[in-house]
Amino acid sequence: DMFMADRGSACCTELVHPTTGRTVLVAVVHPKTVFPGKQLPEGVAPNIYLSRFIAFEPQAPYTIIARSGMFCLGYPKPEEDDDPYHSNPMVHVKMQKLKFGVVPQECPRIHFVMGMVDKIDDPDKVLLSYGVSDCLSRIVEVDKKDIAQLLWNPQQIN
C-alpha cells in the first residue's frame, strides 16, 4: 500500500449524521506515503502528508463511521501578503509542489493540521490551524456543511 495508517492530527467538532440524526465527532487525521525503500508508483514521493476527515461515535470504542477522501491545504498566495514591512517570506519562496502521479498539485508535499476549533461567533464553521513544510503556520475557516459533504456526499462537492 502507498500510505501508512492514518495518524492523529486535530480533534474535534460535532456534526449531525445526515441519515441517523445522531451527533458524531469529527477529527482530522493525516495519512502519509511510505518511507523510501518501499515500492511507490512513478511520480509518487515518499513522506507526502495529506489530510482527511473522519467521523466517529462519541463514546467508547469510538468507532469510525465515515472517512473523507484525502486533501491538502495550501501555501499562502501573493495577494494575501498586503504588508511589505512584515510580510511572510514564504509567500515569495518557490516551494516544491506536490507531484502525485504525473500531475503537479497546488499544495505542499507536507502540511499538517495541528488544531481544530469551532468558530466562536459562528457555530456552523470550524477553524483549522496547520503548518506548511515545517516553515509557516496558517489558519483556514471551513463550513461544517462542507465537511459533512466530504464525509457523506463527496460526489456533490462543487
Image (cartoon, rainbow, N blue to C red):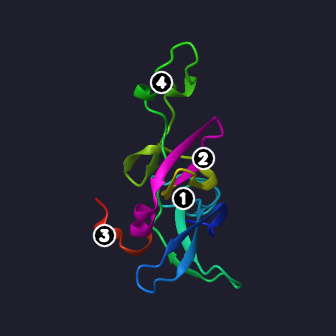
* Label disc, if present, on residue 107 of the rendered structure: none
Q: Distance between the Cα atoms at labels 3 and 4? A: 34 Å
SS at mark 2 in the image:
strand
Q: Which residue is mark 1?
A: 51
The C terminus: image quadrant: bottom left
Residue nearest the observer in this picture, 85 or 101: 85
Q: Are marks 3 and 4 in contact (CB under 8 Å)?
A: no
Query: Which numbered disc, 3 or 4, marks the residue closer to the eye?
Result: 4
* Label disc, if present, on residue 81 of the rendered structure: 4
Report the span colored magenta.
Answer: 126-150
Task: Say if the magenta span includes residue 56.
Answer: no
Q: Which residue is mark 2?
A: 130
Q: Is residue 19 above or below residue 158?
A: below
Residue at the farthest top position: 85
Q: Which residue is mark 3?
A: 155
Q: Are marks 4 and 2 in contact (CB under 8 Å)?
A: no
Quadrant location of residue 49? bottom right
- The picture places residue 25, in percent across and down from the top left corner, at 59, 72
First in sequence, mark 4 or 2: give its number: 4
